[in-house]
Amino acid sequence: MDFGEKLFELRKEKNLSQEEVADRLNVSRQSVSKWETNQSVPDFDKIMPLCELFGIGAEELLTGKKPEEPESSEKEEETKKFPTREEIRRKSAEVVSSSVLIYIVAVAVFIVGVAVLCLDPVIMTAIFLGVVGITTARIIRHYMSIPKLEKTSEEVKEAEIIKQINGIVGAACAVLYFLISFTTMAWHITWIIFVIDGLICQVVRLLFMLKEDKRNEQ
């Protein structure tokens, strides 16, 4: 659709005569007629008044093409950027559960390698710490990437319970560490108790996540 056809169509949609358009733009009726028949084009200073008169943009007026609408609204874009609370909890449960599994396997391999296979404790320790470090960094990265959401009263209560449980477990593991270490003098291996402490804390967190997911499904 050329400019003249577009202008004619817009004028008819507004139920305006050529005289009325001419009066509003302070031009002659003949000028409007020539625009519609593509014998001439409006001066530059008449483009914006025409756009305002018909309520369209300059691109649509000059090319006859309507601007493409975005594929999704701003609300949809915002939803894509910010996952829901349930999606965050499910993703967190996946990260924590897989990390717990890696911790358990790492501890089992370390114990078997040192106590049963009699492999070099230094090498096994280096491998073990490397696996634990990578897994821990994965957990930290996940929780740092989660957008901050206002916690519900139930989540605040659960967080307090988890904190208390982890405190009790941490104190118990510390006592157990010193007790076993002074009794066996196996300081080179008893430090693994603190890794088990962290493992238990993650298991506790995972159990509460699974409990919440089950409650949401109901």
Image (cartoon, helix red, strand yellow):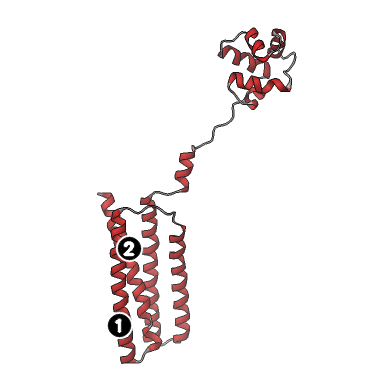
Residue 85 placed where, x, y %? 37, 51
What percent of the width, then of the height, locates residue 69? 54, 32
Q: Mark 1 highlights which residue?
A: 175
Q: Earlier in the sequence, mark 1 or mark 2?
A: 1
What is the secondary structure assignment of the residue under circle 2? Answer: helix
- Residue drawn at x 30%, y 63% as measured from the top left: 160
Horizontal arrangement in the rendering, residue 42 relative to residue 165 (left or right): right
Instruction: Give the camera-side residue of 142 and 155.
Output: 155
Picture residue at 65% right of the left edge, 10% below the top:
23
Q: Which residue is mark 2?
A: 206
As shown in the figure, which amino acid type bears the numbered disc 1? Val
The local crowd at label 1, few if under 14, some if 14 to 19, many if 20 or more residues have their Cα within 10 Å, is few
The reply to whether residue 116 is visible in this rendering is no
Q: How many marks?
A: 2
Q: Quadrant of residue 117?
A: bottom left
Disc nearest the viewer among 1 and 2 = 1
